[in-house]
Image: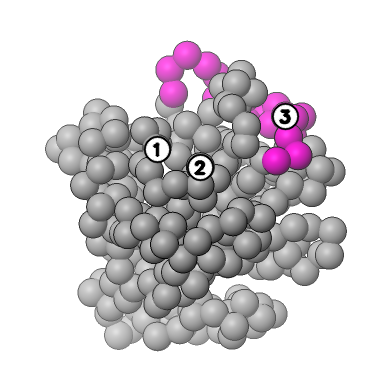
Amino acid sequence: LDIDGRLLPVIRIPGYDQVAEVRSMPQWKARDDDILICAYPKSGTHWIWEIVMMLLQGKAERVNAIKETAMLEGTSQKSFDSLPSPRVLNTHILYQDLPKDFREKHCKMIYLLRNVKDVAVSFFHHHCKLIDYTYSGKWENYLKRFIDGKVDYGAWTDHVLQWEKVAGDNNVNILLVAYEDMHKNPEVQVKRIAEYLGKAASQELIKDIVDLCSFKKMKKEKDPLEDLNEWKDKQPGMYRKGIVGDWKTMFTVAQNEKFDAYLAEKMSPSKWCTQYDLVGT
Ligand code: A3P
């Protein structure tokens, strides 16, 4: 699906015309208490969605739903309107493509960042495992596509640069959360998120949420909720490794040098890149 030259995936959801839904999205109505989690794919959206759902409930209890039910570009306007408040929505689209009302109502947004090399590797496996992509290319070819932005949602560099620009606007209400910081000290990050959302959270609650949202527990308890027909070999692939630095198992030295040169050029205006370990080693 091409919107003004930008690529979005066509998620084949029975029962509605997704192309028409996405095109109508700018007119969708936001609610004052909506929370929107935004990220380039594979940056940890499932993880943070689960945490935010628990913070809003005020208890460390697993929600019996998957984040895709609240994903803007993966739902219909009717389903979107019928979600109970407060809605924890999520999306991979650009700020400029969001429903206008989110901007007008200054809804709270959380933007997730992750080291681009781990994102590329994670996205490669995602493409290989999901049936809808009908993709079975090799890593070296995929990396080229990734650099050229010929993957869902376009180039990571454009996505991050655009969101960084938006986040610098005082009228926009965005909290940044880095995947690597979540790994280093999840309790500190969950506390930051709770404070941003204005949710009281005791140290004990934070600890319990962190524990229930550990990779191991989420994989065990959320994988069974996935529709196995969407995955090759009927093996769900959303919770793959959940680690920092997996890119080192895929990038050759030459690929890494080339990728570093590309990033140095593209991301030179980015302060986020120096502030967070987004392109580092
Ligand atoms: P990997 O493929 O590197 O394992 P998204 O949710 O945005 O699609 O991102 C998916 C990535 O986040 C996958 O990365 C997945 O394993 C990882 N992930 C999901 N839940 C996680 C958790 N609880 N802790 C750490 N990583 C998690």
Task: Report the disc number at residue 28.
Answer: 3
User: Of discs 2 and 3, which sits in the foreground?
Assistant: 2
The residue that appears at 44% across and 23% down in the rendered structure is 13
Q: Callout 3: helix, strand or loop?
A: loop
Query: Residue 73, located in which quarter of the rendered image?
Result: top right
Task: Report the disc number at residue 57.
Answer: 2
Residue 59 appears in the picture as rendered: yes
Magenta-colored stretch includes residue 158: no
Residue designated by label 1: 63
Span colored in magenta: 13-33
Q: Nearer the viewer, residue 88 or 26?
A: 88
Q: Is residue 50 above or below residue 63?
A: below
**Cα distance, mark 2 to mark 3?**
25 Å
Q: Is residue 95 above or below residue 18?
A: below
> Residue 179: horizontal and vertical position, in percent?
45, 68
Left or right position of 94 against 166: left
Quadrant of the rendering where the C terminus is positioned = bottom left
Q: Callout 2: helix, strand or loop?
A: helix
Q: Is residue 136 above or below residue 157?
A: above
Q: Callout 1: helix, strand or loop?
A: loop
Residue type pointed to by label 3: Trp
